[in-house]
Each structure stands twice: as structure tokens, then as C-alpha cells.
Image (cartoon, grey):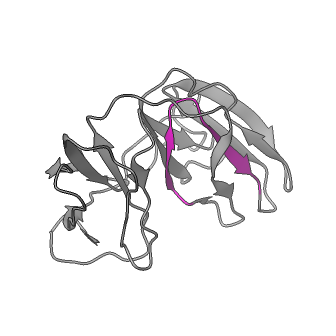
């Protein structure tokens, strides 16, 4: 299970996305398919605001609100342009040879932010923001590292993992910080003269 708190380590946070992932097994790139969906909402949010995929897979962005939205990332650098309600676009080959964190923003609404974790193998899980319980299936035998991450963390939390003895049960307590500032897709402050937040 995963317990998420604010930076003070005491105030419990519910309703946030978490990703648990294993580092150490051989790389296993995914297929070029849409493996996750992040919806742009009418109240200027990306939902969910954190997803995990395997290198090579795609993320789809449907516009589920009434506003015009944009999707861009500084790294790996891509810009899906702007699209209206009911339209959707995916990341195409942006993550084909990429591993790491991709911060996703809207060039129109500075308050919109999401994160895509692009991982080198399929051994990852998103517990769901209600139970925060997770299972990662078919991890090969070995000694690896197990990480837990939620948005607004400075760095993920790690535990040693030894799967040679069979099933392993792990609990995590992770703390998140404040939303980080960002610029628009041109590397400039947003039109109101401020970066977010």
C-alpha cells in the first residue's frame, strides 16, 4: 500500500495518483500503442495528472471540456497544438526512444500540469487513488529497486526488492511538495506576465 502526505509528513493526502515501478530487470520496450489516457477537462485540469507507460508506448489526450486546450512538453520536446472539445491527439513517437519524466502542460492555461513517467520495462503499477493498494505482476527473480512516485515530489522513494523468494509485500509512505513553476512552450512567461504558480 501507499500513504501520501503533504511535505510536513503528517497531513495525509487522498485522491492523488501514484506510480510504483521496478528498476533493475532488463529493458523491455513496449509496443507502439496508446497505453494511457489523460483527459483535458472543462475546469482546466489534466485527469489523471500522473500516468506511467513503457518506452515506445503512447499517451492519448482527449479534450473532454468546452475550452480550447493545448498539450506540450519541454522534455522530450513536443507540441500537439491546440484542439477543441471532442478532439483527441496522441504523442505519436515522442516516447519511442525515451526514458524518464515528461512534464506536460497546456500553453493556454498555466494551471494545467501533468506528468508522464516513461519507464524502461512493464513492471509498474498505478494503485488508484481510492485504495492505494498495488500489485506488480510477473517481475522476474532477482534483486532490484522498487520506487514510489507522485507528482510534486523532489525525487521518488526507493526500497530494496528481492523477488527470488517469491511474492513480496511492500508499504510506502511518500510526501509531496509544492507545484513547480514553468514557462509556456516558447520558454516565456505566460501572457499575464507570470509563470505558474
Using the image as rendered, state which of residue 29 and residue 154 is in the foreground: 29
Q: Is residue 61 magenta?
A: yes
User: Residue at the front extreme?
Assistant: 165
Up the image or down, 81 lies above or below 196; here it is above
Chain part drawn in magenta = 48-63
Using the image as rendered, state which of residue 17 and residue 45 is in the foreground: 17
Residue 181: image quadrant is: top left
Residue 21 image offset from top left, x and y in percent = 34, 48
Task: Name the side, left or right, on which 163 lies relative to 80.
Answer: left
User: Residue at the top extreme?
Assistant: 97
Using the image as rendered, state which of residue 77 and residue 178 is in the foreground: 77
Task: Name the side, left or right, on which 153 lies relative to 137.
Answer: left
Task: Name the side, left or right, on which 79 lies relative to 132.
Answer: right
Residue at position x 69%, y 62% in the image: 41
For the N terminus, give its image quadrant: bottom left
The answer to whether residue 85 is seen in the rendering is yes
Residue 187 image offset from top left, x and y in percent = 51, 25
Q: Is residue 147 magenta?
A: no
Residue at position x 46%, y 69% in the image: 128
Up the image or down, 180 lies above or below 185; here it is below
Q: How many marks?
A: 0
Residue 55 image offset from top left, x and y in percent = 50, 31
Using the image as rendered, state which of residue 53 and residue 25 is in the foreground: 25
Residue at position x 20%, y 44% in the image: 145
The answer to whether residue 186 is seen in the rendering is no
Residue at position x 75%, y 52% in the image: 62
| Magenta stretch, overall SS | strand
Residue 65 image offset from top left, x and y in percent = 77, 62
Amino acid at each position: 500500500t501507499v500513504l501520501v502526505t503533504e511535505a510536513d509528513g503528517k497531513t495525509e493526502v487522498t485522491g492523488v495518483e501514484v506510480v510504483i515501478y521496478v528498476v533493475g530487470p532488463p529493458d523491455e520496450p513496449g509496443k507502439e500503442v496508446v497505453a494511457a489516457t489523460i483527459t483535458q477537462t472543462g475546469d482546466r485540469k489534466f485527469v489523471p495528472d500522473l500516468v506511467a507507460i513503457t518506452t515506445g508506448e503512447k499517451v492519448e489526450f482527449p479534450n473532454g471540456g468546452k475550452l480550447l486546450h493545448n498539450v506540450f512538453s519541454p522534455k522530450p520536446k513536443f507540441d500537439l497544438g491546440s484542439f477543441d472539445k471532442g478532439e483527441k491527439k496522441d504523442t505519436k513517437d515522442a516516447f519511442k526512444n525515451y526514458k524518464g519524466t515528461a512534464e506536460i502542460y497546456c500553453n493556454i492555461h498555466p494551471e494545467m500540469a501533468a506528468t508522464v513517467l516513461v519507464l524502461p520495462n512493464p513492471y509498474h503499477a498505478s494503485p488508484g487513488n481510492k485504495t492505494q493498494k498495488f500489485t506488480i505482476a510477473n517481475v522476474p527473480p532477482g534483486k532490484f529497486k522498487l520506487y514510489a512516485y507522485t507528482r510534486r515530489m523532489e525525487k521518488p522513494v526507493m526500497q530494496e526488492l528481492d523477488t527470488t523468494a517469491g511474492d513480496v509485500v511492500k508499504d510506502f509512505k511518500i510526501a509531496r511538495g509544492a507545484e513547480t513553476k514553468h514557462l509556456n512552450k516558447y520558454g516565456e512567461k505566460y501572457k499575464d506576465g507570470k509563470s505558474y504558480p
